[in-house]
Image (cartoon, rainbow, N blue to C red):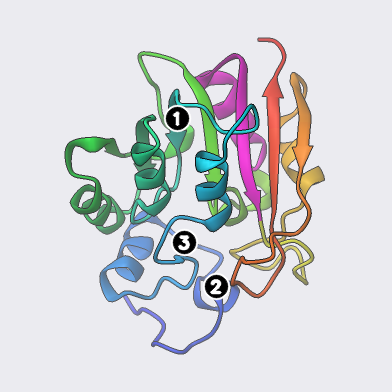
């Protein structure tokens, strides 16, 4: 199975449309992961550390498509109980190496994942934008399955304005796309301005949705 060589382009040109767990895993094995910032997203760190009511207060968080686990580590350090998922074996191995016993790292397809307890937060960062467009409603199914009523979805909405939107991954994603994927029963609570220190080619925003009912 061939892997594109280093320097073959941005996320959207590096990863083919037809993509399975073994191919994602090869990208992690060879370090061909331009979507990986090599650190927690700066906006996530700010939200976890800021004082007052706007801080993300510790609870139980599910992180699908966790990759190497940088964002998961930020949640752990802020006192959260973390369950991190990825279906690429190499990503899981690297996340387990980073996180040790501080978080539960599960090798699983997020859309088939079942938990014995519900979550306060579902965190999306470069997960939903990698999901083919016809599978996006499955994200809403996942959110309804794992979140408590009153629980929240936080998405670092990216890549906003990417053209053509249907070519990916990453597929173009905006706030309305996340709302549509979640479907009925969620209300949009917050959308930030474009995140100034996101280093990638397309803009990103911080979005928060709250679950209203079952």
Disc 1/disc 2 C-alpha distance (Å): 26 Å
Q: Nearer the viewer, mark 1 or mark 2?
A: 1
| Label 3 or label 1, whichever comes before in sequence order | 3
- Residue 37 image point, x, y percent: 46, 66
Residue range corresponding to the magenta coloring: 136-157
- Residue 68 image point, x, y percent: 33, 56
Disc 3/disc 2 C-alpha distance (Å): 13 Å
Task: Look at the picture and state if 158 lies above or below 7.
Answer: above
| Label 1 or label 2, whichever comes before in sequence order | 2
Label 1 sits on a secondary structure element that is strand
Report the front residue among 7 and 26: 7
Q: Nearer the viewer, mark 3 or mark 2?
A: 2
Q: Nearer the viewer, mark 3 or mark 1?
A: 1
Which residue is under mark 3?
19
Which residue is under mark 2?
11
Local crowd size for mark 2, using a 10 Å CA cut-off: few (<14), some (14–19), many (≥20):
many
Task: Look at the picture and state if 18 lies above or below 103.
Answer: below
- Residue 127 image point, x, y percent: 53, 50
Which residue is under mark 1?
61
């Amino acid at each position: 199975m061939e892997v594109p060589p280093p320097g073959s382009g941005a996320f959207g040109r590096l990863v083919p449309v037809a993509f399975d767990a073994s191919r994602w895993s090869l990208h992690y094995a060879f370090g061909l992961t331009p979507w990986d910032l090599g650190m927690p997203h700066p906006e996530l760190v700010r939200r976890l550390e800021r004082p007052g009511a706007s801080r993300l207060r510790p609870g139980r968080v599910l992180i699908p498509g966790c990759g190497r686990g940088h964002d998961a580590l930020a949640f752990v350090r802020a006192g959260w109980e973390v369950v991190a998922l990825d279906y690429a074996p190499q990503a899981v191995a690297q996340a387990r190496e980073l996180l040790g016993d501080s978080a539960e790292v599960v090798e699983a397809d997020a859309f088939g994942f079942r938990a014995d307890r519900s979550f306060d937060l579902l965190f999306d960062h470069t997960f939903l934008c990698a999901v083919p467009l016809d599978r996006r409603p499955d994200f809403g199914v996942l959110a309804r399955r794992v979140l408590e009523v009153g629980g929240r979805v936080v998405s670092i909405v990216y890549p906003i304005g990417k053209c053509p939107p249907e070519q990916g991954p990453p597929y173009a994603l905006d706030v309305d796309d996340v709302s549509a994927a979640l479907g009925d029963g969620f209300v949009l609570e917050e959308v930030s301005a474009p995140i100034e220190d996101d280093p990638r080619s397309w803009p990103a925003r911080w979005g928060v949705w709250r679950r209203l009912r079952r």
